[in-house]
Amino acid sequence: MASSTDSPRDAQAPQSAGSAAAPEKPSDSYVQSFARGLSVIRAFNAQHPAQTLTEIAQASGLTRAGARRILLTLVGLGYVQADGRLFRLTPKILDLGFAYLTSMPFWNLAEPIMETLSQQVHESCSISVLDGTEIVYVLRVPARKIMTINLSIGSRLPAYCSSMGRVLMAGLNEAELDGVLRASELRARTIRTVTDIEALKAIVADIRTRGWALNDQELEEGLVSLAAPIRNRAGQTIAAINISGQANRTSAQEMLERFLPPLLEASEKISGLVGLRT
C-alpha cells in the first residue's frame, strides 16, 4: 500500500489500556515484569521507530531504571538494538507475530482462495480477527490503493465502524458485544459513521441474521467494503474476510450485487478448511 497522508497510527497502533476491556490480572499468576517488557515493545511504532530511554519510559509508563533493565534484556536477546542514545526494534521481533500465524496453518490454505477472489473481483481482499475493540489484519491481498491509511498484516482498525469488525462482533453474545461497544472510542470518522450504541447493536443484530456486512463509507470517505464470517467446525465466528473497493468506481449496491456471491463462496471454502483443521 502507498504511504499515508493521514495518520497511519489509526491502522497500526496498539490499543490503549482504556480502549478495551482489559484482561484480569490474577494475583497469584500475573507476571508483572513480563507485562512491563511487552509494554516496552509496544512503545515502538511507525511514528516512533527509534526512541531514547526517557521516551520509552514515558510511553510505557515505567521508570527510567525499569525501562533500562528491560531494554538491556531485549538487546541481549536480540529483539532491540542500541544506536547511541536511541533504541529500535530488530527484525527478530517479527518472530513473535510470525509464531501466531504459523501456529494456525489453515491461514496458509486460505491465501490461495483470497487471491482467486481478489482476481475475480479486481479488489483488495483481507482477513482479520477481533482483538478487544479492534480488528487485526492477519492476511491481505491488495489490489489498488483504496485507503489513505496503510494496511498490512498486523494493522488495526476499530471494529465498530468496519465491515469485518461488525461481522466479528456479530459472533459475540450480547454481554460481550455490549462490553466491546462500551469500551470503544465511538467517534464519527466520516459523516456516515454510526456512533450510537443502540443503533450499532441493531446493525450487528441484522448482520448476525443475514450473515454478512456492508459498510458504505463509515470508516473512510470513498471506501466501501463487504465482509463475511469465517467459522470453525462448531459454527463459531473466528475471523472475517472482506472485499474493499472505491465508491467512485463501485457503489455499495453494485458491490452487494456483484461481489457478495463470490465473497460468501470464499468464506464457506475457508470455513470448510478450518473445519478440517480444528
Image (cartoon, rainbow, N blue to C red):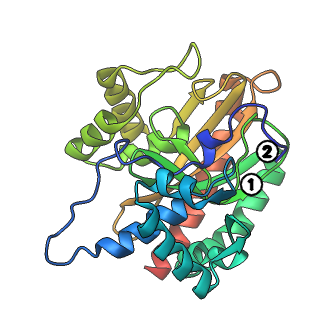
- Residue 15, above or below 60: above
Q: Name the residue carrying label 2.
A: 121
At 50% from the left and 64% from the top, the residue drawn is 40
Q: Where is residue 278 in the image (x, y as percent from the top left)?
A: 42, 79
Label 1 is placed on what type of residue? Leu
Other residues around mark 1 within 10 Å, as few (<14) / some (14–19) / many (≥20): many
Helix, strand or loop at label 2? It is helix
* Residue 225 in view of the camera: yes
At 75% from the left and 35% from the top, the residue drawn is 147
> In this view of the protein, which residue sits in the foreground, 5 or 36?
36
Q: Where is residue 120 in the image (x, y as percent from the top left)?
A: 81, 50
- Residue 178, above or below 132: above
The numbered disc on residue 117 is 1
Query: Is 221 displayed left or right of 1 in the figure?
Result: left
* Residue 211 in view of the camera: no
Other residues around mark 2 within 10 Å, as few (<14) / some (14–19) / many (≥20): some
At 83% from the left and 53% from the top, the residue drawn is 119
Quarter residue 44 falls in: bottom right
Q: Do the residues labelled 2 and 1 touch (CB within 8 Å)?
A: yes
- Residue 16, above or below 215: below
Quarter residue 60 falls in: bottom left
Label 2 is placed on what type of residue? Val
Q: Position of residue 80 (x, y in %)?
A: 64, 75
Query: Is 26 displayed left or right of 38 in the figure?
Result: left
